[in-house]
Amino acid sequence: MTAPAPDTGRTEPAAPRAPRSVWRLRHAGLALLLVAAAPTAVAAEPIPIPPPLDPVPADSLGVPTPIEDPSGVALRHFYRSLTATARGEGQTRIAVFGASHVAGDVFTRVMRHQLKSRYGDAGLGFLVPASPWRDYYNRDANLSYSKGWESSWVSRTRSRDDGVYGLAGISFTSSSKHDWARVETAHKSPFGRTASRIEVFYWKQPDGGEFTITVDGKDKHRVRTKADETGPGYAVLHVPDDGHKVEVRPKGNGPVTLFGIALDRDVAGVVMDSMGINGARAATQLEWDPRIFADHLARRDPDLIVLAYGTNAIGDTDDPIDAYERRLDLVIARVRSLMPQASCLYVGPSDRPVKVEDKGDDGETRLSFLPRPRQEQVIDVQRRVAHRYGCAFWDWARAMGGDLSMVSWVNADDPMAARDYVHLTRRGYERIGQLFMDAVMTPYEATLPHPFGLPTPGTASIRSVP
C-alpha cells in the first residue's frame, strides 16, 4: 500500500524513479532505511521511518556535544564571574529565556542545582507568582495565587497591544482586593530555602491603584503604583536571611499590574532567573516594550544570558528562512546591546520529526517519521547569528542524536520523551540538562588547577595532560 505524502509544509516536484538499493540498519534500537540512488539519477524522496520494533535502551541515548564558540571568548565573562564567586567575592547571575523546554523547569533545574551546589546559593531569583498557565513552574519555589488575575503574554489570545510585559514576558493585573499572589521559599528543595532581599517588579501608571506586601503574615508594606508617567517600578524590602512567605494583594482602589517577585540573598553564590513561555519564538521578545525589558534586564544584571528557542520555529513552514534570520538578528542584537559585558549562549531546538500517519489493511493507524527539512535550516541560522554577535551556540538536536533521534527517545524502555514527539519526559530533560552542563563547564574546568595532575572532583571526563 502506498503511504500518503507527509505534510512537510512545502511542495516539491516529483523526482524521476531510479534503481536503488535499500539496506536496513539497526542503530540505538531504531530501524533506519538508507536509500542509495544511481549516480546519474536525481535523489529519491525520503522514505518514512517506522518506530523501532523493540524498546531502545534509555541509557544509550544522548551524545556529548561541545559548545561551539569560534571566538573562544563568548563565555569568558561568565567563567570569570564563577571564579570570583568561588572565592566568595560576589554573585554569578544567570538569565535563561525560552519556550516550553524552559517553562517546565527541569532542564534548567539541573543547571541551577549543580551550579549552586558548587558555588553557593544566592536565592530563588526572579519569579512570576501568578502562574499564567497550569504547568508554569519554578521547581524550588512555592507559588500560589487567586484566580482573578488577568495574565498576559504574547500569544494568539492573551497578548496586550501596549507591549507591557515584564522580564519574563508576562504581566498580570487586578483591581480587586480579593486577589492575591504568594511566593514562599523552598520547603523540600535544598536550594532556595532562604532570602534576605525581596523585590516586587510593578508598573507605574496614572490610574494605578495600591497594593500591599505582607511578609510572613505580619509585616505589611503599602505601595502606590499611581504616577504621572508610565514606567517600571520596584519595591525593595530587606529581611533576615531566613525562610519567608511573601504575599502581594491589591487594595482595590485601581488597577495593579505586576511583573514578578525576586527573592535573593546578600551572599556570594549563584542566582538563576528562568523565564519560559509555552509556544514562544525568539521573536516574541520583539513584542515586549523595549523600555521595560532594558530596565528589568539591567536590574537583574546577568553575567550569562541563555536564549533557548527554535523548537516551535522549525514547525513554521510558511515563514521564509531569511525572514526568520532577520528577526533573530534583531533579538540577539538587542540583548547584546543592552548587556554587552555579559556572556551570551544560544541553545538550539530539540529534534522534531515530521509524523506521517497511514492506515494499514487492518484499519489501524500507523505512525512513521521523516526528518523535518526546516530543522537544519533553523539551526544553521541560529549558529550563524549567534556567532555574528559573539555568542556561543549549543546544538540540542545533535545532543539527542540528530535527525529522527526523537523517535528513539519516545520509544525508550524508560521513555525519555513524550508521545507528542516534541517534549521530553522528566528523565529526558535531566539527561539533556546534564549534557548541557558538561558542555558549558568542561572548558572552564579544564582551566582550573588540578593538584597532582588529578581531575577536579565531579569532572571525571576531563583528563590532565601528561
Image (cartoon, helix red, strand yellow):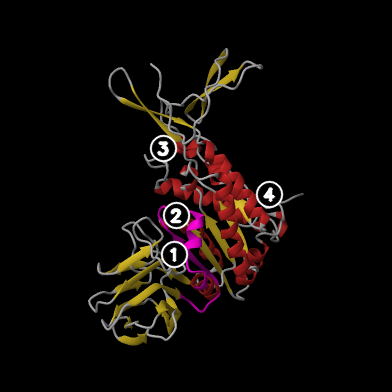
Observer-side mark, 4 or 3, equals 3
* Label 2 element class: loop
| Label 3 to label 1: alpha-carbon separation | 31 Å
Query: Is there a contact, CB below 8 Å, between mark 3 and mark 2?
Result: no
Observer-side mark, 4 or 1, equals 1
| Label 3 to label 2: alpha-carbon separation | 23 Å
Q: Residue 353, image x and y in percent?
A: 46, 36
Give me the residue at 33% from left, 72% from top.
173
Query: Is there a contact, CB below 8 Å, between mark 2 and mark 1?
Result: yes
Q: Is residue 83 above or below residue 15?
A: below
| Label 2 to label 1: alpha-carbon separation | 10 Å
Q: Circle 3 sits on which residue?
A: 410
Mark earlier in primary sequence (4, 1)? 1
Mark earlier in primary sequence (3, 2)? 2
Q: Is residue 191 visible?
A: yes
Observer-side mark, 3 or 1, equals 1
| Label 4 to label 3: alpha-carbon separation | 34 Å
| Label 4 to label 1: alpha-carbon separation | 42 Å
Mark earlier in primary sequence (3, 1)? 1
Which amino acid does the dot numbered 3 rest on? Val
Q: Circle 4 sits on which residue?
A: 463
Q: Residues within 10 Å of mark 4 (few under 14, many from 20)?
A: few
Q: Circle 2 sits on which residue?
A: 280
| Quadrant of the rendered image containing residue 163 | bottom left
Viewer-nearest residue: 364 or 406: 364
The stretch in magenta equals 264-291
Give me the residue at 30% from left, 67% from top.
150
Mark earlier in primary sequence (2, 4)? 2
